[in-house]
Image (tube, helix red, strand yellow):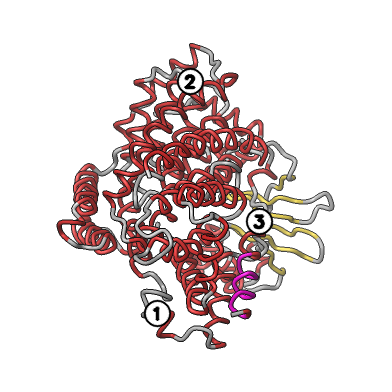
Amino acid sequence: MIFAIVVFSIVYVLIASEKVNRVAAALAGAGVILAVGTVTTEDAFYSTETGIDWNVIFLLFGMMVIVGVLKLTGVFEYVAIWATKKAQGRPFRVMALLSLITAVASAGLDNVTTVLLIAPVTLLVCERIGVRPIPFLIAEALASNIGGTATLVGDPPNLIVASKSRLGFNDFLINLGPLVIVLLIVFVALSRLLFRKDFEADPEQVAQVMTLDEKEAIRDRPLLVKSLIVLALVLVGFTLHSVLHIEPSVVALLGAGILIAISGLRPKTYLADVEWETLLFFAGLFILVGSLVKVGVIDQLATLLVEATNNSVPTAMMVLLWGSATLSAIVDNIPFVATMTPVVSELVAPGGQYAGEDGLWWALVLGADLGGNATAIGASANVVVAGIAKRNGHPISFWEFTRYGLVVAVVTLAIATPYLLLRY
Amino acid sequence: MHAHEIAEPYPVIQAETSALDAARMIARERRPGLVVIGRDGAPSAVLSASQVVQFMVPDYVQDDPNLAGVMGEEPSAKIAERLQRATVASLLPREPDELPVLNSDDTVLEVAAIMARLSSPLAVVMDGGEILGVITASRLLETVLGDSQ
């Protein structure tokens, strides 16, 4: 047991410190665990309890392929510029609309892809309007993390929780969707206040935005139609999970396969956006967490959590919500959620201390997703936006992001608190 | 045939030179690139025409080429203004690339090999510590095809 804890802790510290590439750290840790025999190949590759969660890996892979093809169509650029023109280039309206588009797209796709698509358009729009793009980019990263909370495929922690908890796409939508809508409304109002100094623009320059031609963004109309049809079918497949009994991973793979077949694209093109590093990171992480499950560490963590929360579901939910939010603000939320998922799974399983209390799952998801907004390094979307901004000559300092992010994280978590306590 | 026999005199620039001046030199004389020299007169980099062209494109359009059509025609004055604000150094990669430098007695095949390996539009021929001249891809092809006739 000690050996598994030591290896896991070293890997966790290496990932958190960013001294070593996170994929290298996770795979090296998994390699050591396998080589020493703490887990066998049977445990690592074939066990649903302690092994790699292939549902998560293939769901991510399928969605990456679909998004990679959809990205080529220019639909995001079209919608973003159309919305900017509808807002007549008025800075606050532009920020609100782009943030909402980002949030909605993040619910259907992953957050990083969404901000990668929206950030370049934002830079163009801000240049035309003549405003500082940094507040707009920060608002989009924050909106992306809020929007991604709403669905099973919106954020990687949701995928991990969904796979272990057997909560479906509709469960996420029904339980988190209404809250996320409220959070987005509050977020837009809050942005008006937080970024109030950044909405001054020269009316002549604002008019420049109307010269942008969104129709030019659509380069391949047939591909756009095919991609949207497949995406719609995939989303329908997710929502009909309880009827069709087809796992989301299979739905995503089928969607990716159909899109590859009908698009006629070459492998180099449709595989260009597959983040192999992320998939390998997940695989390594699952093996490491599986070793903790196998040696009984997760059992002990579950017992500790029950003792610390005095057998009280509300207390347990608050510990999970605010605890995971705090940790997610500081370190990558994926390893944290991967570790906590078997703990919560054990607690809510039939016969567990909190049997059937799904509120614990939602507390974990909300804490991990919304907590990521608190700092510039709290979520992958924040890091990606900061990178794009820097490359384009608008560096966002850690504190500039955190100044806004922390307020948004605390406010959204404060709204999630009564929601969890009253509903569950 | 050896490198010193096909090398031609070639203009050089310094890293501090304005990007606009460099672009004008490339455009006026239709050159594939320019040799950048350090304060000691030794070559420090090759600025290819494609690197100057790349600089004309805003980074966000390089991130998302779909935006190029959306923006419409960008006024040439605006592009010139962007180049005017930059220096040659800012057009070069942060991590210096290997220099396509040749010795004066290198063969035509050695010239071709270094240009191909570094995907460089030109190679600098050195004699001791001095620049003897430059061989461009077109000059090299002219030499090779001329020999075969």
Secondary structure mostly seen in the magenta stretch = helix
Q: Is residue B31 visible?
A: no
Front-lying residue, A185 or A397: A185
Q: Which residue occupies the foreground of this view, A114 or A88?
A: A114
Which residue matches tag 3? Answer: B8
Please state the horizontal and vertical placement of residue A11, each as a whole percent of the image. Answer: 61, 69
Considering depth in this image, is A137 or A269 the residue closer to the camera? A137
User: How far apart are the two marked residues, 1 and 2, measured between alpha carbons?
Assistant: 51 Å
Tell me if mark 2 has few (under 14), some (14-19) or many (20+) residues whose alpha carbon lies within 10 angstroms of its own. Answer: many
Q: Position of residue A333 (x, y in %)?
A: 53, 55
Q: Quadrant of the C terminus of chain A?
A: top left
Q: Label 3: chain? A: B
Give above or below for A94 relative to A234: above
Circle 2 chain: A
Q: Are marks 1 and 2 in contact (CB under 8 Å)?
A: no
Query: Judging from the image, what secondary structure is the residue with disc 3 in?
Result: loop
> Which residue is found at the position 54% from the left and 54% from the top?
A309
Give the residue type at disc 3.
Glu
Question: Would you name the residue on which mark 1 appears?
Answer: A45
Q: Residue at x 25, y 64 (%)?
A: A250
Magenta span of residues: A3-12
Work out how far the residue at label 1 is from the one at label 3, CA to CA, in angstroms.
Answer: 63 Å
